[in-house]
Amino acid sequence: MKCKSLSTKLRLLLSASMLVLSQQALSAPNDTITNQATVAYTVNTNAQTAINSSPTGNNVPGSTEGATTDIKEDQLINFAVHTNDTENQVALPGSGANATTHTTNFTVYNIGSNNASDVALSASNTTNFSNGKITVSLAAVDIAGAPSPHPTSGDVFATSNCVVYDSTDNAITELELNPGESKAVKVSCDIPAVQLNGDVSGAVELRATVIKDYSNNDITGVDNTTANTIAGVEHVFLDDGKHGDDNDNKISIDYSAFIIEAPVLTVTKTVAVISDPSGSASASAKAVPGSILEYTIVVGNSETPVANGVTVIDALTPNLACNSVPSLVHSAGTTLTTPSCAQTVVGTCGNLGKDETCTLTVRAEILNN
């Protein structure tokens, strides 16, 4: 009966002592998490000197005896790349990669790393439980044949020479992110000159790859499935695995796309008989040799992008001859140079903005040949 009572007391005291273990707060990779248990007990109601624990076992009483049980904190890396675009981003045909003219937009987040490390572009997440930095490398490419993430009826075209820019428009290939930090980046690509209004690019991929850990060492592998080493520091990845990227590795990706917004010019040419040799009124004049025809050519732009350097060329056929000085009028009131009366009439309209028109009027005589 006495032995049973002693055993019960030992169990209760041991349980109570385990509640007051000294443990270092989790902070950063490579920190040593220290833990030691103390067992207090009595014999025949007489208190005995407590015994401290040891990784290899300790039975020597005393506050200086035993040893702590230590383990190294591993590096938790949780990051993501997410696009900020909810629709295709506007680009003009023939535009080269440029941080200020046409960009797709992303955010890179260090959302779950327990140290600062270098991470190639990561993206947004509202949950933040990181306490360290990472360094990431950034790569942006057009995924050949992959459709836009925001499909439309336009043709799919391929971009090239995609460049990643930071928030100050500097071209970059890497980012360093502190715990809980996010950084906005932009991707711009070369746009083919032959694309038409409404054409849509294939998916523009931004890929972020963690390349440096908390101590600026290269990350060469993923330790999620390897055995833990008590005295070593492993890399544990918790990325979101979006868009076909495997979960829990050192890569995160997301996509956006471009859509062509170009001027759409409509050219309308009409003709009216102004007079004929019989002297009939213009309403009843006929197109016979010696008649004067009036050609009206109207060029209009129906889209927002400006059409630059608009020139109207009207080459008269051999059975026509320019009869009087042509007229050239811009709907915005822009002063234009009056074209010369010639077999080929050239009207220089300049720029046409949205809903603007340029009208060239040419009068020609029908020749008797």
Image (tube, helix red, strand yellow):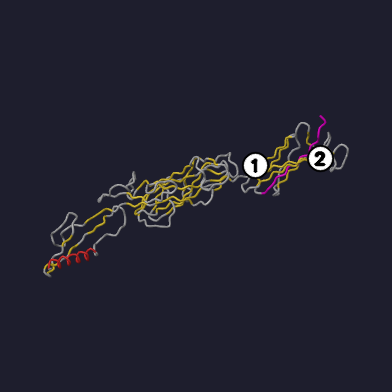
Disc 1 marks a residue whose amino acid type is: Gly
Residue 309: give its label: 1
* First of labels 1, 2 by sequence position: 2
Q: Cβ–Cβ below 8 Å for labels 1 and 2?
A: no
SS label for mark 1? strand
Farthest residue to the bottom: give it: 45
Q: Is residue 361 above or below residue 9?
A: above
Give the quadrant of residue 94. Answer: top right
Name the magenta segment's main secondary structure: strand
**Residue 16, image x, y percentages:** 22, 66
Placement of the C terminus among the 4 image quadrants: top right
Determine crowd level at label 1: few under 14, some 14-19, many 20+ residues with C-alpha closer than 10 A: few
**Residue to which mark 2 is pinned:** 273
Placement of the N terminus among the 4 image quadrants: bottom left
SS label for mark 2? strand
Determine crowd level at label 2: few under 14, some 14-19, many 20+ residues with C-alpha closer than 10 A: many
Asked if residue 245 is among those painted magenta in the image, a careful observer would answer: no
Q: Nearer the viewer, mark 1 or mark 2?
A: 2
**Residue 44, image x, y percentages:** 11, 69
Q: Is residue 281 above or below residue 59?
A: above
Q: Nearer the viewer, residue 179 or 284?
A: 284
Residue 102: give its label: none
Farthest residue to the front: give it: 1
Disc 2 marks a residue whose amino acid type is: Val
**Residue 121, image x, y percentages:** 43, 48
Mark count = 2
Asked if residue 356 is among those painted magenta in the image, a careful observer would answer: yes
Which residue appears at 30% of the width and 47% of the height? 226
**Residue 135, image x, y percentages:** 38, 48
Q: Nearer the viewer, residue 144 or 179?
A: 144
Q: Give me the C-alpha separation between circle 1 and circle 2.
A: 31 Å
Give the residues in magenta: 355-369
